[in-house]
């Protein structure tokens, strides 16, 4: 297994400890936000291949899990 794949597997395992039912789509949104803080919902939707509504729901789910910090 490559180094990058091992790191991804470790990160995925850590996410599953925090929420063992988190959908892959929500993980993809989390990773996109982590790569580009301040990304808009529209950009996020495009990057992840989602509708704006779906991107918004996934951001809300991450906020409910306290996985996102607010930008005050």
Image (spheres, rainbow, N blue to C red):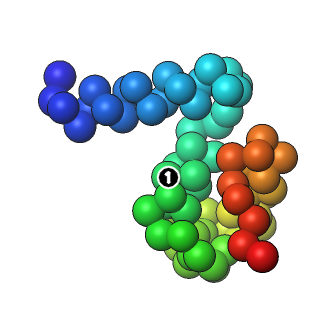
Residue 36: image x %, image y %?
48, 69
Residue 70 seen in the current view: yes
Q: Residue drawn 83% across and 46% down?
A: 64
Figure quadrant of residue 4: top left
Q: Residue drawn 67% across and 68% down?
A: 51
Q: Tell whether 7 sits left or right of 49.
A: left
Q: Residues within 10 Å of mark 1 (few under 14, many from 20)?
A: few
In the displayed orientation, state which residue is furthest to the front.
Answer: 72
Q: Tell whether 31 sits left or right of 1.
A: right
At numbered mark 1, what does the secondary structure look like: helix, strand or loop? helix
Figure quadrant of residue 54: bottom right
Where, quadrant-wise, is the N terminus in this rendering? top left
Residue 14: image x %, image y %?
53, 26
Residue 39: image x %, image y %?
57, 75
* Front residue of this view, candidates 51 and 9: 9
Residue 44: image x %, image y %?
57, 70
Where, quadrant-wise, is the C terminus in this rendering? bottom right
In the displayed orientation, state which residue is furthest to the left.
Answer: 2
Vertical arrangement, residue 16 with respect to residue 70, above or below: above
The residue wearing badge 1 is: 31
Residue 58 seen in the current view: no
Vertical arrangement, residue 28 with respect to residue 3, above or below: below
* Front residue of this view, candidates 51 and 56: 56
Q: Residue drawn 67% across and 33% down?
A: 22
Q: How many marks?
A: 1
Q: Residue drawn 62% across and 20% down?
A: 17
Vertical arrangement, residue 21 with respect to residue 29, above or below: above
């Amino acid at each position: 297994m490559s180094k990058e794949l091992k790191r991804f597997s470790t990160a995925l395992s850590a996410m599953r400890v925090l929420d063992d039912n988190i959908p892959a789509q929500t993980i993809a949104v989390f990773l996109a936000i982590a790569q580009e803080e301040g990304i808009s919902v529209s950009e996020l939707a495009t990057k992840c291949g989602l509708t704006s509504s779906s991107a918004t729901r996934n951001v809300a789910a991450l906020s409910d899990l306290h996985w996102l910090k607010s930008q005050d």
